[in-house]
């Protein structure tokens, strides 16, 4: 069993049922999440019989580290699961902090045509401990403290709802990593029934929400994101316009900008109409496409990127350009994994 698959209450129940004191859970969680210790023998305030019990029944890491690929603005980490699948994680160097982009699935079933993760489909969901271990190991290997965690790596987080929810609990609870809820973001392609569930979930509703729009019309979005055939853009936007938000929070609309596909002035104006009178509820992140050699899409010209941003700002919509980091290490989600495994399209 992997101990990071348990919440504090679950560990208390487990230990008490085995005849140990309930406060042992607090001690172990402090060692793991506050001190980054992944060896039971070095948890010196635990009695020997308890350490023996832990050693014989649990392990702390769920993933095996394979490779670390650094660049000037980010580092990509590759891990392997016990059943042989590759998981990738990206540590992003911001101006005054570090952000970790974690994966929630091996592969993805959403099928976005511009995404390397979708090339070979969905293999399986990541378990809670496999999500948490990405942060544990990256902090230990890199020696840095991660401030922000974004679920923007491989997979669709809301298609792995229960495991992601439990991981968010461990990330944000005082007994876990104790990250600010404002510094954890769930990024989704827009699974409408799961967004409704998330809106009233006492754990998931507390964190930030980002939704990949990527096109301002139903037709174009269907071409890029087949999920739009069953999760209509109009229905998605109606839900987001009514989504309950915490004070001073906004929903991020992610817009991957692709040359000749969704980068025209007409596209910008259509996005303005799509947002309508709800301009204070949203901000738009323009993400110039991070090309992958075997996919047909390309990054727009710089003037097209700037022009689209200008049109949105002129129409009262907060809009920021987020250039993809880690291009030299195939930084977009799924790219290094595909490169490592030799996945073909």
Image: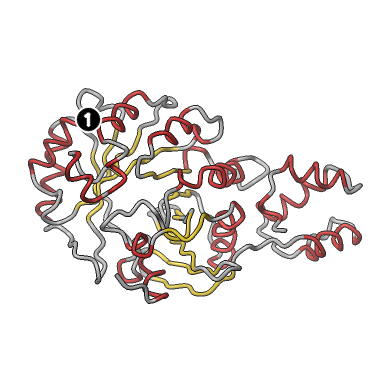
**Residue 123 sits above or below residue 277 on the image:** below
The crowding category of the residue bearing disc 1, from other C-alpha atoms within 10 Å (few below 14, some 14 to 19, many at least 20), is many
Left or right of 251 on screen, residue 19? right
Q: Is residue 108 left or right of residue 147?
A: left
Query: Residue 259's quadrant in the figure?
Result: bottom left
Q: Residue furthest front?
A: 230
Q: Relative to the observer, which residue lies in front, 106 or 91?
A: 106
Q: Name which residue lies at 32% across and 61% down.
A: 325
Query: Badge 1 is on which residue?
Result: 275
Q: Position of residue 32 (x, y in %)?
A: 69, 55
Name the side, left or right, on which 214 lies relative to 60.
left
The x and y percentages for residue 219 are 17, 42
Task: Give the residue at x 72% y 58%.
Answer: 1
From the top left corner, tell me how far across and down residue 159 is, in percent.
Answer: 46, 46
Q: How is the image coloured?
A: secondary structure
For the residue pair 273 and 121, the one nearer the viewer reads as: 121
Q: Is residue 235 left or right of residue 261?
A: right
Q: Residue at x 18, y 30 (%)?
A: 316
**Quarter of the C terminus within the rendering:** bottom left
Asked which quadrant contains residue 295, the reply is bottom left
Q: Secondary structure at mark 1?
A: helix
169 is higher (above) or lower (below) than 101:
above
Q: How many marks?
A: 1
Residue 258 picture location, percent across and down: 18, 55
């Amino acid at each position: 069993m992997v101990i990071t698959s348990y919440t504090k209450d679950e560990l208390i129940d487990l230990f008490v049922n085995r005849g140990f004191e309930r406060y042992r859970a607090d001690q172990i969680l402090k060692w793991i999440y506050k001190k980054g210790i992944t060896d039971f023998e070095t948890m010196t305030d635990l009695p020997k019989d308890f350490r023996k019990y832990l050693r014989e029944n649990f392990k702390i890491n769920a993933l095996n580290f394979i490779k670390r690929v650094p660049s000037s603005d980010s580092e990509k980490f590759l891990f392997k699961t016990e059943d042989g699948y590759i998981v990738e994680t990206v540590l992003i160097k911001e101006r005054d902090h570090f952000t970790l982009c974690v994966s929630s699935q091996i592969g993805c079933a959403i099928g976005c045509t511009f995404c390397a993760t979708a090339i070979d489909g969905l293999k399986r969901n990541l378990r809670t401990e496999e999500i948490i271990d990405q942060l544990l190991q990256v902090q230990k290997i890199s020696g840095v403290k991660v401030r922000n965690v974004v679920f923007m790596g491989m997979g669709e987080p809301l298609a792995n709802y229960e495991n992601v929810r439990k991981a968010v609990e461990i990330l944000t609870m005082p007994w876990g990593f104790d990250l600010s809820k404002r510094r954890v973001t769930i990024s989704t392609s827009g699974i409408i029934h799961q967004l409704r569930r998330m809106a009233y979930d006492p754990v998931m509703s507390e964190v930030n929400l980002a939704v990949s729009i990527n096109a301002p019309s139903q037709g174009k979005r269907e071409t890029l994101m087949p999920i739009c055939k069953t999760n209509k853009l109009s229905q998605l936007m109606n839900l987001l316009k009514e989504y309950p938000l915490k004070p001073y929070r906004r929903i991020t609309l992610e817009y991957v900008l692709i040359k000749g596909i969704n980068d025209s002035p007409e596209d910008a104006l259509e996005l303005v109409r799509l947002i309508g009178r709800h301009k204070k509820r949203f901000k738009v992140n323009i993400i110039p496409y991070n090309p992958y050699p075997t996919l047909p899409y390309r990054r727009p010209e710089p003037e097209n990127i700037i022009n689209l941003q200008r049109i949105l700002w002129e129409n009262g919509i907060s809009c920021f350009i987020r250039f993809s980091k880690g291009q030299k290490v195939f930084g977009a989600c799924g790219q290094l994994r595909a490169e490592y495994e030799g996945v073909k399209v």
